């Protein structure tokens, strides 16, 4: 007996359950999963492709970056795709040009992928997506402010909201001298966080300090922290990510400044080690697992002929811990 017969449903319904469709009731889905378990069913991708003319493969194009954001997004998408019954292939790009993007797309089309995800943290890469014709559903993990070409669905975490929460938190504590250490200028997230820091400070009628360095790693944060300590430390720093915050904390410690008594620090990302920093880091959390599920569910709907028409943005959330406090005065 096959799964459909055992569950008392059609083969199409079984396919929908395996592909994570939301068109199936929870009762029917449970019945199909029970039949799968009882029969010891294992998916055979080759057999399924022959019968359904669908490969069950999603291609993921990304950069070679090993930074927390892109790697976390990649892992989250892969796990969510597997839960939805899809296999994934990954094509990392060493250089981001229309030609390299086109080559990666052609590679995946040769594997008969059903859809493509493009993780585009770089401004240039996000813009180049719209220059390449891709004949399957596409979801781009990129800033919603990027140009939105027809047929490309954009999903992201709201960077502006996260940065605004971080700076407002410091203002509410009483800080008026708030420095910022941004990420690289060619990263969309870095631009968004810096822009919002400037906007919130302007709204509060406060000046912004000169930027003393850019990057994503602790070394940059450390060097900027030493300079700030030498030249006159602010009472608070909004770091572009948690790695920068770690470098800042170390530099201030070496300079005899205490966090948060002398300088408050807010990070961004909420990496797994943030709660083990000394002091435990106040930061902005990006929910990467939820982002992965949203990317895949958006793709599945597009595959089934129900594409989203507007960019989708998830909220970021401020996590207050021990690295922020009111200024001494």
Image (spheres, rainbow, N blue to C red):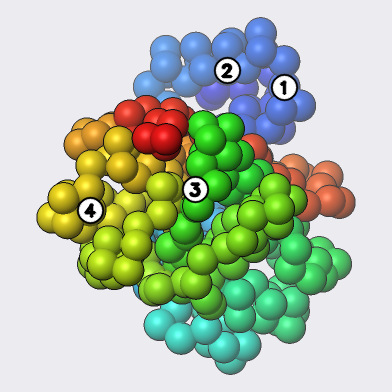
Residue 158 lies, in percent from the top left, at 65, 47
* Residue 22 picture quarter: top right
Q: Measuring 28% from the left and 55% from the top, which residue is drawn there? A: 248
* Quadrant housing the C terminus: top left
- The answer to which of marks 3 and 1 sits earlier in the sequence is 1
Q: Which mark is residue 252?
A: 4
Structural distance between the alpha carbons of marks 2 and 4: 58 Å
Mark 4 vs mark 3, CA separation in Å? 37 Å
Residue 71 figure quarter: bottom left
Residue to which mark 1 is pinned: 24
Height in image: 287 above or below 89?
above
Tag 4 near tag 3, CB within 8 Å: no
Q: Quadrant of residue 165?
A: top right
Secondary structure under tag 1 reads loop
Disc 4 versus disc 3: nearer the observer? 4
Q: Earlier in the sequence, mark 1 or mark 2?
A: 1
Q: What residue is drawn where x is 37% and y is 28%?
A: 321
Residue at 58% x, 32% y is: 172
Residue at point 17%, 56% (across, down)? 255
Q: Mark 3 and mark 2: span between their CA atoms?
A: 24 Å
Pinpoint residue 224: horizontal percent, then vertical percent.
31, 67
Tag 2 secondary structure: helix
Task: Identify the residue position indicated by label 2 in the image.
Answer: 32
Question: In this figure, which residue is indicated by the disc labeled 3?
Answer: 77
Mark 3 residue element: helix
Using a 10 Å C-alpha cutoff, classify the residue at mark 1 as few (fewer than 14 neighbours), some (14 to 19) or many (20 or more): some
């Amino acid at each position: 007996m096959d799964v459909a017969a055992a569950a008392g449903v059609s083969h199409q319904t079984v396919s929908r359950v395996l592909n994570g469709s939301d068109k199936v009731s929870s009762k029917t889905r449970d019945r199909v999963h029970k039949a799968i378990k009882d029969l010891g069913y294992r998916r055979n991708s080759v057999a399924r492709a022959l019968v359904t003319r669908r490969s069950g493969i999603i291609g993921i194009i990304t950069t070679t970056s090993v930074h927390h954001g892109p790697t976390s997004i990649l892992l989250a998408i892969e796990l969510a795709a597997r839960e939805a019954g899809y296999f994934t292939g990954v094509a990392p790009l060493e250089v981001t040009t229309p030609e390299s993007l086109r080559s990666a797309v052609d590679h995946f089309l040769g594997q008969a992928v059903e859809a493509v995800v493009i993780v585009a943290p770089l401004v240039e890469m996000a813009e180049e997506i719209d220059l390449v014709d891709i004949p399957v559903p596409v979801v781009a993990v990129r800033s919603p402010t990027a140009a939105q070409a027809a047929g490309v669905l954009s999903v992201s975490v709201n960077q502006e909201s996260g940065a605004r929460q971080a700076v407002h938190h410091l203002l509410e504590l009483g800080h008026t001298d708030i420095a910022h250490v941004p990420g690289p200028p060619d990263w969309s997230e870095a631009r968004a966080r810096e822009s919002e820091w400037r906007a919130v400070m302007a709204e509060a009628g406060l000046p912004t300090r000169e930027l003393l360095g850019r990057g994503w790693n602790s070394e940059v944060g450390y060097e900027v922290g030493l300079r700030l300590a030498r030249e006159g430390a602010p009472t608070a720093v909004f770091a572009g990510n948690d790695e920068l915050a770690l470098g800042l904390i170390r530099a201030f410690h070496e300079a005899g400044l205490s966090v948060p008594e002398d300088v408050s620090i807010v990070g961004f990302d909420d990496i797994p080690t943030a709660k083990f920093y000394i002091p435990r880091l106040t930061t902005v959390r990006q929910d990467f697992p939820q982002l992965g599920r949203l990317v895949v569910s958006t793709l599945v709907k597009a595959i089934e002929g129900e594409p989203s028409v507007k960019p989708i943005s998830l909220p970021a959330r401020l996590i207050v811990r021990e690295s922020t406090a009111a200024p001494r005065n």
